[in-house]
Amino acid sequence: MLEVTPRTRLTRKPDRQVTDRRMLHEILDAGIVAHIALCADGQPMVLPVGYGRDGERLLIHGSTGAGLLRRAAAGAQVAVVVTLLDGLVYARSMFDSSMNYRSAVVFGQTTALSGDAKLDALRLISERLMPGRWSEVRPPKPKELAATLVLELPLDEASVKIRTGPPSEDHPDQEDPLAWSGVLPLRAVADEAIAAPNVRPGVATPPSIDAARARVAAIDGTQL
Amino acid sequence: MLEVTPRTRLTRKPDRQVTDRRMLHEILDAGIVAHIALCADGQPMVLPVGYGRDGERLLIHGSTGAGLLRRAAAGAQVAVVVTLLDGLVYARSMFDSSMNYRSAVVFGQTTALSGDAKLDALRLISERLMPGRWSEVRPPKPKELAATLVLELPLDEASVKIRTGPPSEDHPDQEDPLAWSGVLPLRAVADEAIAAPNVRPGVATPPSIDAARARVAAIDGTQL
């Protein structure tokens, strides 16, 4: 269960608040891009990042050159959000029209990983984003590891919001005999892989591309 | 041209910084969901929102019940981000592997709209999210308008980051004769619309559903 804290309590549509930790995991495992927000000298900053979940921690990676991530590594409070857009909800009024979505926000402080813990975390993130690719390519070089920041954020405090299903409408609107209402489902798809110009003739698309296709299909929604 | 300010200057990969205002517009027009971040008593907060662009302003709508939006309406500095994920970039090393994306962050203070300006803005947002739907349904009621917050954010200060094309790799990696590298393109698609259970038999899917399908196709990427 996710404990509801002052910063995770929904002030609006509390019926959309979900405290099942499995749903948090499901959303985090489906998404590819997260947005990390923090306050820098009182000003909000936000950045899209690749990430992966491992048990009860979120692993975020980026460049040591990214100022926002350095601030996070230095202990700034962060809010990390992953949103999956599952559909457009067409009610018989604009007011009741909505979107179907699954969204998770994790609050807390990150820790920068180093040594074996950092390498393990990079492998875990890689397996989430591009399953199987890690073992198809050469290992990271020390200077590459040095240029990479890997942050760990415990899943201690998180809010999960989900809207699903058909429109919820006011009674009179529902009685309009001519009006259509419903949902337009959205999802992400992967198209054919495009080889880089320098790939030698005859080099086949690797198994990790098929794995990524399955991984994208598993999102069952988009992050639109 | 977008002026580069201390908070929009990229500290990392400055080659990905784009100052063409048309690109800002293109990204904002493609996206469906934005994330709005702000600082509340020094703590970062972030929320997914529906939005639309109109000229040099971003229009965000939400409920008057959303604490974050009320803080934004009261003048808090915000950062609003829209990210489109266009593909997974498979290099011959994990370090050079990446994602193709288009991302825009707009900084500033929002103004809450009222009266005709509010109604006009709601129509504009609606036309961006569900083109044509506004005129298929009844007009908003006064109590619905009262429960809706519409914020305007000028596109004065914004940073745009784009990564596109094949992997950029270190020279030795490129010479591996057996290794594949390339891009797995991603995009969002709309599936068949699902009518709500209370739609009368014979009521056809409205033209706005086809318009939304075209609108999703125009994203040419996902927001994953």
Image (cartoon, coloured by chain):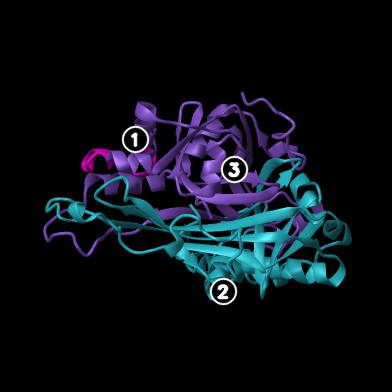
Chain colours: A cyan, B purple
Point out the tag, 3 or 1, that comes first from the N-terminus: 3
Q: Circle 2: is it few (<14), some (14-19), or many (20+) Cα within 10 Å?
A: some
Task: State which chain disc 3 sits on.
Answer: B
Residue B27: percent from the left, percent from the top? 52, 39
Circle 2: residue type:
Arg
Q: Which mark is residue B123?
A: 1
Q: What element carries label 3?
A: strand
Q: Which of marks 3 and 1 is in front?
A: 1
- What is the secondary structure assignment of the residue under circle 2? helix
| Residue B179 rendering spot, x and y as whole percentages | 70, 63
Residue B56 % position (x, y): 51, 26
Question: In the rendered image, which residue does mark 2 sit on?
Answer: A21
- Span of residues in magenta: B127-140
Quarter of the figure with residue B122:
top left
Mark-to-mark CA distance, 1 and 2: 38 Å
Same chain, marks 3 and 1?
Answer: yes
Q: In this view, does B74 lie above or below B1?
A: below
> Residue placed at 54% from the left, 51% from the top?
B47
Kind of residue sitting beneath label 1: Arg
Q: Is residue B95 visible?
A: yes
